C-alpha cells in the first residue's frame, strides 16, 4: 500500500490553475524523481504535501487515512519532512545544534533545564554515521562543504523518524564531486525504507538514483513510470511538450 | 584534540584580543602614570563608569544576536529614570520606584518588540521612533525640571545605586552578576540557542519550528529592561533624575557590543563580549583624560572603533568563507 497517496489534487491561485487533477502515490523505500519546467507545478505539489497550503480540490491519504494539513507543523507531525533547496541551516551554529534546532535535548528538572550538548552531539554522530557522512557534530555549519550541509539537513529528517522526505533541488547548489555524496545519502534513506521525492532539474541525478519518474507540465501529470522504461530524451520531450504524454 | 580546538576558538575570538588590549593599556598606563592611573579611586571610577554601559550592552547583545538593533536604549534610560524619580518624589517606597522603572522599561521594549516581530517593521526604524518618543515623554513628564527631592525612601534608593560592597561599586557587582546570568542563558538554555538561530538564519529557524516572533519580542523587552536597570542604578548613584540622562548612550552601548565581537548582521556575540567591549571604551577614555587629551575627542575614538571593529569582522568573515 502507498505511504502517501494524492488523489485528483487541484490547486487554484485566483484564476490561475497551478495543478489540475494530479494523482500521485508514494511507496516506502522508493525514490521518485519529480520533474518539470519552472511553473509546471512541482513546488505547488510539494508545498501541498508539506502542508504549506491545502489543495483546492482532491484528497490526500497517509497510510490509507485521509489527512488535512493546514500548517507545515501538521505535515511534520505526520512524518513528512522537507529538505529545502537553500538548505535552511543556521551557519553560525554547530551541526548538532542544527540537527536538533527547535527540538533540543535538555537535562535538569522541572522548569530548570539546560541544553544537553553532549547527548545531542552523540546522537548526531550516530545519525551522520548512519548516513556514512564525515560530518563532525561540534563543527560550525559555516565551515562545511555542500555535501556535509546536505548530511546535516537530512540528519534533521532522520531525527524525527520521518517516513517521507521531500528533497527540493538538493544538488542544485553544490559541486559535481559532492553531488555523488548527496545521491549516496538518498540511496541510504531508501535502504532504511523511507519514501523520497526528489525534485530536480538535473537529468543525470534523477536517472542515477530514482526508481520512478513523474513529469508535470502546466499543472498536469504527463508521465508516471518506472525509470527503466523511460529515457532522458523522452523526459526532455515530456517537459518541453514535444511529447504530449507517456 | 579538544584542548587544541578550544585554544583555536579562543584565539579566533574577538573578546580574547580585546581583553589583551585592555590589559596592555592598563599596564602601559600604570607604568606611565603610576600616581594617578592604578589608584583605588581611579579604578573605582573606571569600573563604575563602564558598569551601567555594560549592563545595557548585555540587553543590546540579545537584540543584536537576533539580527536587530535597538537605538532607543538611551532614551528609554532617560524615561525610566524620570519615572523612578517621580515615584520617589511623590513619597512612595523605593521598591515601587524600582518596579515602576522596570515596568516602564518593559513597556517600551514591548512596543519596540511587537512592532519589529509581529508587524514586521525594521528594528532600525522602530527604535529610532522610540528614541525620539521616549525622550519626549521624559521631558514632558519631568516638566523639564531636575528631580532630586526623593521623599522618605530616597536614602534607600540612593544607597542601591551609589553604594559599594567591599570597595567595589554596587553597579559593578550588578554588572558581574548579570554578565554571568546572560552568559548562562546564551550558552546553556534553549532560549539562548534560539536567539542565535534567529540571527543566523531567520527563515531556517522559522521552518525548524523556532518561535521566531516571540524570541524577537523577548529580546527587545530584555534590552529595554537592562536600560531600566541601568537608569535605576544611575539615578540612585547621582541622587537626581534628569530627562537628559542617557543621551547618546546608544552609540556607546552599540559600540561596546560590536567592539566585544558582536556581528551587526546577527548570530554572533556573547555576554562577556558586551562586558569587555564596554571596558575597553572606558579604559581608553580614562587614559585619554590622563594623557591630557581633550575628552571631546572620545566620540571620534568611539566612532572610529565601531567602524574598525566591523571592518575587522568583515575581513575575518571573508577569510572564513
Image (cartoon, helix red, strand yellow):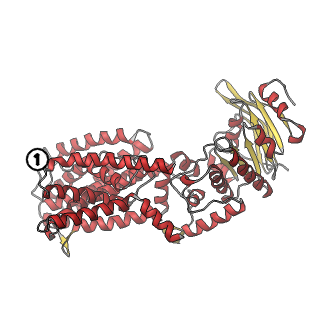
Compared with A58, B181 (above or below) is below
Position of residue B213 in the picture relative to residue B137 (left or right): right
Count of number-bearing discs? 1
Furthest residue toward right: A229
Examine the rendering and report whether any part of residue A20 can be seen. yes
Instruction: Indicate left or right for B249 with A178 as reference.
Output: left
Q: Quadrant of the C terminus of chain A?
A: top right
Residue A152 at x, y = what percent?
63, 55
* Residue farthest along the bottom direction in this orientation: B166
Task: Indicate the chain on which mark 1 is placed.
Answer: B
Q: Position of residue B107 (x, y in %)?
A: 32, 50
Q: Residue at x 68, y 35 (%)?
A: A44
Left or right position of A234 against B275:
right
Q: Residues within 10 Å of mark 1 (few under 14, many from 20)?
A: few
Q: Nearer the viewer, residue B127 or A9?
A: B127
Q: Is residue B247 visible?
A: no
Q: Relative to residue A177, is residue A23 depicted above or below?
A: above
Please, what secondary structure does the residue beneath circle 1 have?
Answer: loop
B51 over B215 or under it: above or below: below
Give the residue at x 15% y 71%.
Answer: B40
Q: What residue sits 74% from the left and 43% below the top?
A: A198
Q: Position of residue B123 (x, y in %)?
A: 38, 42
Q: Position of residue B203 (x, y in %)?
A: 54, 45
Q: Does B6 sit left or right of B45 as displayed? A: right
Q: Specify the quadrant of the image occupied by residue A242.
A: top right
Write down the residue under mark 1: B145
Amino acid at each position: 500500500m502507498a505511504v502517501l497517496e494524492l488523489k485528483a489534487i487541484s490547486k487554484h491561485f485566483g484564476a490561475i490553475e497551478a495543478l489540475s487533477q494530479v494523482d500521485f502515490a508514494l511507496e516506502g523505500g522508493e525514490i521518485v524523481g519529480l520533474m518539470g519546467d519552472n511553473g509546471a507545478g512541482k513546488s505547488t505539489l510539494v508545498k501541498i504535501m508539506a502542508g504549506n497550503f491545502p489543495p483546492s480540490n482532491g484528497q490526500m491519504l497517509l497510510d490509507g487515512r485521509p489527512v488535512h494539513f493546514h500548517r507545515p507543523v501538521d505535515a511534520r507531525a505526520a512524518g513528512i519532512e522537507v529538505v529545502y533547496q537553500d538548505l535552511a541551516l543556521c551557519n553560525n551554529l554547530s551541526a548538532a545544534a542544527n540537527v536538533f534546532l527547535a527540538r533540543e535535548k535538555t537535562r535538569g528538572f522541572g522548569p530548570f533545564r539546560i541544553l544537553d550538548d553532549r547527548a545531542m552531539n552523540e546522537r548526531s554522530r550516530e545519525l551522520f554515521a548512519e548516513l556514512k557522512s564525515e560530518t563532525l557534530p561540534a563543527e560550525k555549519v559555516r565551515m562545511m562543504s555542500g555535501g556535509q550541509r546536505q548530511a546535516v539537513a537530512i540528519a534533521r529528517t532522520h531525527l524525527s523518524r520521518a517516513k517521507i522526505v521531500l528533497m527540493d533541488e538538493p544538488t542544485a547548489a553544490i559541486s559535481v564531486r559532492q553531488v555523488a555524496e548527496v545521491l549516496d545519502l538518498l540511496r541510504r534513506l531508501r535502504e532504511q525504507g523511507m519514501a523520497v521525492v526528489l525534485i530536480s532539474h538535473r537529468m543525470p541525478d534523477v536517472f542515477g538514483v530514482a526508481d520512478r519518474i513523474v513529469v508535470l507540465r502546466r499543472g498536469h501529470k504527463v508521465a508516471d513510470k518506472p525509470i527503466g522504461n523511460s529515457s532522458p530524451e523522452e523526459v526532455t520531450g515530456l517537459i518541453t511538450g514535444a511529447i504530449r504524454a507517456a | 584534540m579538544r584542548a587544541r580546538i578550544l585554544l583555536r576558538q579562543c584565539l579566533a575570538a574577538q573578546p580574547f584580543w580585546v581583553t589583551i588590549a585592555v590589559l596592555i593599556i592598563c599596564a602601559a598606563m600604570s607604568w606611565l602614570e603610576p600616581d594617578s592611573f592604578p589608584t583605588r579611586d581611579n579604578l573605582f571610577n573606571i569600573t563604575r563608569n563602564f558598569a551601567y554601559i555594560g549592563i545595557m550592552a548585555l540587553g543590546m547583545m540579545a537584540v543584536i544576536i537576533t539580527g536587530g538593533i535597538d537605538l532607543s536604549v538611551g532614551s528609554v534610560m532617560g524615561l525610566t529614570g524620570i519615572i523612578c524619580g517621580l515615584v520617589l518624589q511623590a513619597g512612595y517606597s523605593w521598591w515601587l520606584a524600582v518596579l515602576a522603572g522596570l515596568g516602564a522599561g518593559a513597556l517600551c521594549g514591548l512596543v519596540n518588540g511587537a512592532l519589529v516581530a509581529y508587524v514586521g517593521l525594521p528594528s532600525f526604524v522602530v527604535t529610532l521612533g522610540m528614541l525620539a518618543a521616549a525622550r519626549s515623554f521624559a521631558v514632558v513628564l519631568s516638566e523639564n525640571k531636575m528631580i532630586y527631592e526623593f521623599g522618605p525612601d530616597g536614602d534607600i534608593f540612593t544607597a542601591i545605586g551609589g553604594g559599594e560592597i567591599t570597595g567595589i561599586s554596587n553597579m559593578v557587582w550588578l554588572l558581574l552578576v548579570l554578565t554571568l546570568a546572560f552568559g548562562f542563558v546564551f550558552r546553556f538554555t534553549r532560549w539562548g540557542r534560539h536567539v542565535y538561530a534567529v540571527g543566523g538564519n531567520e527563515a531556517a529557524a522559522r521552518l525548524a519550528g523556532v518561535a521566531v516572533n516571540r524570541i524577537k519580542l523577548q529580546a527587545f523587552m530584555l534590552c529595554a529592561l537592562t536600560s531600566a536597570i541601568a537608569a535605576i542604578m544611575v539615578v540612585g548613584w547621582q541622587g537626581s533624575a534628569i530627562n537628559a540622562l542617557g543621551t547618546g548612550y546608544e552609540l556607546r552601548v552599540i559600540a561596546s557590543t560590536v567592539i566585544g565581537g558582536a556581528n551587526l548582521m546577527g548570530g554572533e556575540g556573547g555576554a562577556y563580549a558586551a562586558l569587555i567591549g564596554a571596558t575597553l571604551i572606558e579604559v581608553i577614555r580614562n587614559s585619554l583624560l590622563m594623557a591630557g587629551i581633550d575628552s571631546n575627542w572620545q566620540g571620534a575614538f568611539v566612532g572610529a572603533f565601531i567602524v574598525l571593529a566591523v571592518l575587522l569582522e568583515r575581513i575575518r568573515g571573508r577569510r572564513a568563507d
